[in-house]
């Protein structure tokens, strides 16, 4: 099946029961596939009037107690930014898939890119932390969609899956394990007296339990800066407390959230850093370099945000340099540079978008730079 | 008033107290504002309908009217500007047992949120939408709205509004709403009855409430608070089932109030279940 279909299947395996969508190439197949599957499992699909509404409906369904999601691409991702911010501020679990295509604007609707990575990080206004994953195959997007739901439930936050047109439209073998072999998580439910419940009072992992509308807690949910009760609080102190909570629940759990894969890193002198579809390019380039006697290693970012900066910092102490491979003009490359902090040279093998990067380009850069 | 009665009155609870987050009072609404009256009519309707309040939610957008969700002691959601309806749509679809009431202003529901309004009405989403129409953007200091009368003065139309306003009941009717009514804040009894009816009725219900914004709209249009209320009394006429084409808000003529649409068609959820779900 295609990556898009595998994503929809992963969502169903994770227990997703609501999809609010809007058609857009190259993400439409996710909506098509899940719209046909949801009714039979007791879920609901709705095609909204635009992506703003789609994202708003996803948040509404999450507060009704359902696991909910949407999928889009560049222009729709831009429109969803408003309510992604509401989701972050109100700590609403949900999953949003961006099947990236070439931009800016309408760009290259049918051709892939990885150029929304910084938008994923900073696209909604204000400071915040976000979780974003990047799958590199149809099989992986199946599992990653489940992981994305688990993380969103665990940390009460929107989680992004930053895939791309190439994976979305590529057909690959996908094995779907039996349901009892899939681990699914649910947001912790509050206990104790309903009238004393505080909607944003963090539990041990920095995350507050979350009731659903209709559970009798009479919760108030607002996108205004709010206190632990959820009430608007227009003060510098309230802003600081809320922002710290939003930040800490992600950053203090970095070890749990950040997933990377290391290939021949132990003795590597040159480390290729990549994610998503470009990690397949990078893997091939690393193997070819090794065959040529170059000590290359490969660090694959499975979690792109929060960024694995400690990993890069540690490697920067001992390797000769980094090469970041991504289908954009240098986004994660900037993060690698930031983490390497001038200790180690950082190079980019980038692309304007529309096609994958070939391993030859990576090899050429290795030879040129080192 | 005899002293004894007075003391007893002081200890009496407000009849709507159990529906108000009293720890959030005082509210932000200005003296003379119409929102509070519309809000208490809404609360009375919620309470009086005999429905399970635990399953009742209020969703608001942004603006003065949008603050209503912050004062009601129910599950309540204060969302982004214009997006109360699509948020409410997700809430209702996520749990069809909920009674979902959208309470917001004209700027929120009909300018930035206009697209969502017509689509929710078209799909007959099971929501009760209450719009306090005060003819301008109050929260931001009185700018022109999609409801501002032609030639009215606002901070962005100091020479008079060059544009023409929406006829909201006509828009709701044309979009497919199954219940449409309009009252002013002077007509609280009728308003409360209509809201109660709208909540218990399935499908997309829309109630427009004309309410003054003396601070921003009234002041700039030489309308003293009492004058606005006098207009509501003298320049309105109740005509149930009026032709939606005749429902422009123009106080130089008579503004028509009443219940304009009350019909039945399958709701979004009923149609979805019938069309998309296989029979058991
Ligand atoms: S600005 Fe106008 S609408 Fe807002 S609270 Fe004051 S009177 Fe009411």
Image: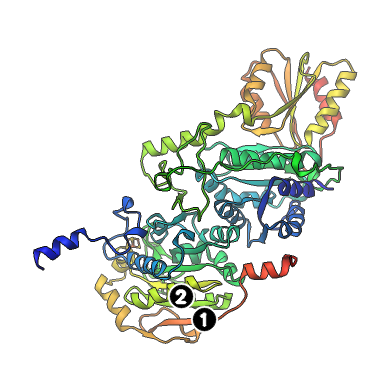
What is the residue that sits farthest to the left in this orientation?
B2
Of callouts 1 and 2, which one flags the residue occurring earlier in the amino acid sequence? 2
Colouring of the image: rainbow
SS at mark 1 in the image: strand
Do we see residue A201 in this rendering?
yes
Do we see residue A103 in this rendering?
no
> Can you give x and y, in whole percent of width and height, for residue A169 in the image?
82, 48
Give the quarter of the figure containing the N terminus of chain B.
bottom left
Residue B197: which disc?
2
Gap between marks 1 and 2, in whole Å?
Answer: 10 Å
Residue A206's place in the image compared with A292, above or below, is below
Mark 1 or 2: the one toward you: 2
Where's ligand 1: which quadrant? bottom left
Residue B24's place in the image compared with B89, above or below, is above
Callout 1 touching callout 2 (CB < 8 Å): yes
Residue B35: which disc?
none
User: The disc numbered 2 marks a residue on which chain?
Assistant: B
Q: Are marks 1 and 2 on the same chain?
A: yes
Label 1 crowd (10 A; few <14 / some 14-19 / many >=20): some
Residue A299's place in the image compared with A154, above or below, is above
Circle 1 is placed at which residue position?
A: B262
């Amino acid at each position: 099946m295609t990556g898009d279909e595998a994503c929809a299947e992963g969502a169903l395996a994770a227990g997703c029961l609501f999809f609010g969508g809007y058609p857009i190439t190259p993400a439409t197949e996710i909506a098509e596939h899940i719209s046909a599957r949801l009714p039979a499992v007791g879920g609901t699909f709705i095609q909204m009037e635009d992506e703003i509404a789609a994202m708003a409906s996803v948040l509404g369904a999450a507060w009704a107690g359902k696991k909910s999601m949407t999928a889009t691409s560049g222009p729709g991702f831009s429109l969803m930014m408003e309510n992604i911010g509401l989701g972050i501020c109100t700590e609403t679990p949900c999953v949003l898939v961006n099947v990236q295509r070439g931009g800016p604007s309408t760009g290259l609707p049918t051709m892939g890119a990885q150029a929304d990575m910084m938008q994923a990080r900073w696209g909604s206004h204000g400071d915040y932390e976000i979780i974003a994953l990047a799958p590199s195959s149809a099989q992986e997007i199946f599992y990653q969609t489940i992981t994305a739901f688990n993380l969103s439930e665990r940390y009460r936050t929107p989680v992004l899956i930053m895939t791309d047109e190439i994976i979305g439209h590529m057909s690959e073998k996908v094995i779907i394990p039996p349901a009892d072999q899939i681990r699914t998580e649910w947001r912790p439910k509050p206990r104790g007296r309903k009238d004393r419940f505080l909607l944003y009072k963090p539990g041990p992992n920095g995350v507050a339990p979350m009731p659903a509308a209709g559970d009798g807690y009479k919760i108030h949910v607002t996108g205004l800066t709010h206190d632990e009760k959820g009430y608007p609080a227009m003060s510098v102190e309230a802003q600081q407390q809320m922002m710290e909570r939003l930040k800490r629940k992600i950053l203090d759990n970095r070890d749990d959230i950040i997933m990377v894969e290391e290939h021949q890193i132990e003795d590597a002198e040159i480390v290729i850093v990549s994610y998503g579809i470009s990690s397949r390019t990078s893997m091939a380039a690393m193997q070819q370099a090794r065959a040529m006697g170059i000590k290359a290693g490969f660090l694959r970012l499975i979690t792109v945000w929060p960024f694995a900066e400690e990993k890069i910092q540690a490697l920067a102490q001992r390797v000769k340099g980094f090469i970041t491979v991504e289908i954009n003009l240098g986004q994660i490359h900037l993060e690698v540079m930031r983490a390497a902090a001038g200790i180690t040279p950082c190079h980019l093998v980038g692309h304007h978008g529309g096609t994958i990067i070939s391993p030859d380009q990576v090899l050429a850069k290795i030879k040129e730079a080192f | 008033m005899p002293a004894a009665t007075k003391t007893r009155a002081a200890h009496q609870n407000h009849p709507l107290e159990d529906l108000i987050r009293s720890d959030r009072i005082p509210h932000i609404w200005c003296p003379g504002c119409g929102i509070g009256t519309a809000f208490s009519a809404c609360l009375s309707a919620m309470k009086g309908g005999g429905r399970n309040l635990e399953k009742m939610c209020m969703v608001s957008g942004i603006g003065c009217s949008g603050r209503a969700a912050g004062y009601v002691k129910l599950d309540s959601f204060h969302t982004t500007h214009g997006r109360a309806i699509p948020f409410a749509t997700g809430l209702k679809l996520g749990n069809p047992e909920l009674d979902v009431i959208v309470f917001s202003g004209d700027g929120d529901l009909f300018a930035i949120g206009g697209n969502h309004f017509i689509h929710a009405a078209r799909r007959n989403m099971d929501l009760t939408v209450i719009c306090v129409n005060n003819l301008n953007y109050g929260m931001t200091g009185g700018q022109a709205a999609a409801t501002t009368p032609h030639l009215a003065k606002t901070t962005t139309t100091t020479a008079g509004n060059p544009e023409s306003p929406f006829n909201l009941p006509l828009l709701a009717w044309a979009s497919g709403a199954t219940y449409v009514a309009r009252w002013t804040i002077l007509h609280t009894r009728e308003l409360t009855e209509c809201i109660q009816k709208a909540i218990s009725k399935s499908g997309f219900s829309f109630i427009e409430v004309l309410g003054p914004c003396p601070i921003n709209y009234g002041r700039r249009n030489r309308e003293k608070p009492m004058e606005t209320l006098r207009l509501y009394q003298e320049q309105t006429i109740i005509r149930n089932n009026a032709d939606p084409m005749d429902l422009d808000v123009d106080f130089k003529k008579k503004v028509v109030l009443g219940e304009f649409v009350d019909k039945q068609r399958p709701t979004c959820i009923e149609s979805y279940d019938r069309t998309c779900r296989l029979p058991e």
